[in-house]
Amino acid sequence: EAQVTQNPRYLITVTGKKLTVTCSQNMNHEYMSWYRQDPGLGLRQIYYSMNVEVTDKGDVPEGYKVSRKEKRNFPLILESPSPNQTSLYFCASSPSLGEINEQFFGPGTRLTVL
Amino acid sequence: AQSVSQHNHHVILSEAASLELGCNYSYGGTVNLFWYVQYPGQHLQLLLKYFSGDPLVKGIKGFEAEFIKSKFSFNLRKPSVQWSDTAEYFCAVSQSYNTDKLIFGTGTRLQVFP
């Protein structure tokens, strides 16, 4: 089944404790992206990647890091989480740049930073 | 900067009522337009999309949207809603030269009562 998976789905952590949220897609998509969803603000893009080893900042990149060593995986790293990063996070992927494609979303990761 | 406005933040309807959710964007060039739906506890799913051609687009579950270029609008409609349409609806826009950069609106929460 074609899908985007995220792990963990729920995470409660404390300020300053490094964490990684994994994202994997099995559709051979080149483009992957991370969003955070907050009430009243909709979805805001954190980082995106157009291909392996190619990443760029989205609209709200502060406090986050990403890497794209393999085409299928795009982990989101919070080196020192803070309470303002409590949010619902979605990973998404889509096929090649230059084509008009919808983005496919993962199930979301609800993160709480105490 | 490109932006998307959804002026209806929360809409409450009874079953069988008609629905229209507003979406306006700010960008003068050629755009691609999307409506995504997020059912409670689930990830975003594509309802419909417009790239070119007929400005009246039909999507899944009886939804449709009309692109009015002169008004920079892409309103979502359904003639008769059901309880199962209770969800959050997001309008999104991408520029034709940068199709993977999606800008989301803040979302409209729809509640349908039996």
Image (cartoon, coloured by chain):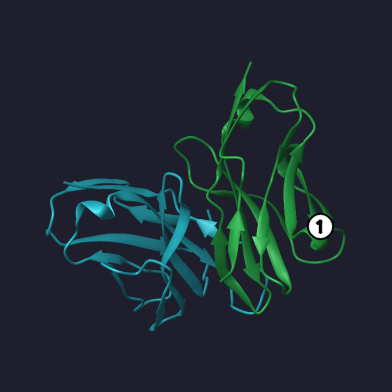
Chain colours: A cyan, B green
Residue A105 seen by the camera: yes
Q: Give the chain of mark 1.
A: B
Specify the farthest residue to the bottom.
A53
Specify the farthest residue to the right.
B54
- Other-residue count near label 1 (Cα within 10 Å), few / some / many at <14 / 14–19 / ≥20: few
Residue assigned mark 1: B68
Q: Amino acid at mark 1?
A: Ile
- Quadrant for the C terminus of chain B in the image: top right
- A24 to the left or right of A30: left
| Res A102 → quadrant | bottom right
Residue at the image point whose x is 63% and y is 23% from the top: B83
Specify the farthest residue to the top.
B114
Residue at the image point whose x is 80% and y is 32% from the top: B79
Residue at the image point whose x is 47% and y is 55% from the top: A43
Residue A103 seen by the camera: no
- B83 to the left or right of A11: right
Foreground residue among B4 and B66: B4
The number of numbered badges drawn on the structure is 1
Foreground residue among A81 and A75: A81
Q: Position of residue B15 (x, y in %)?
A: 69, 20
- Quadrant for the N terminus of chain B in the image: bottom right
Instruction: Determine whether B58 is above or below A18 in the image.
Output: above
Residue at the image point whose x is 74% and y is 73% from the top: B30
Q: Position of residue A108 (x, y in %)?
A: 40, 49
Q: Position of residue B78 (x, y in %)?
A: 76, 36
Q: Position of residue A69 (x, y in %)?
A: 34, 79
| Res B2 → quadrant | bottom right
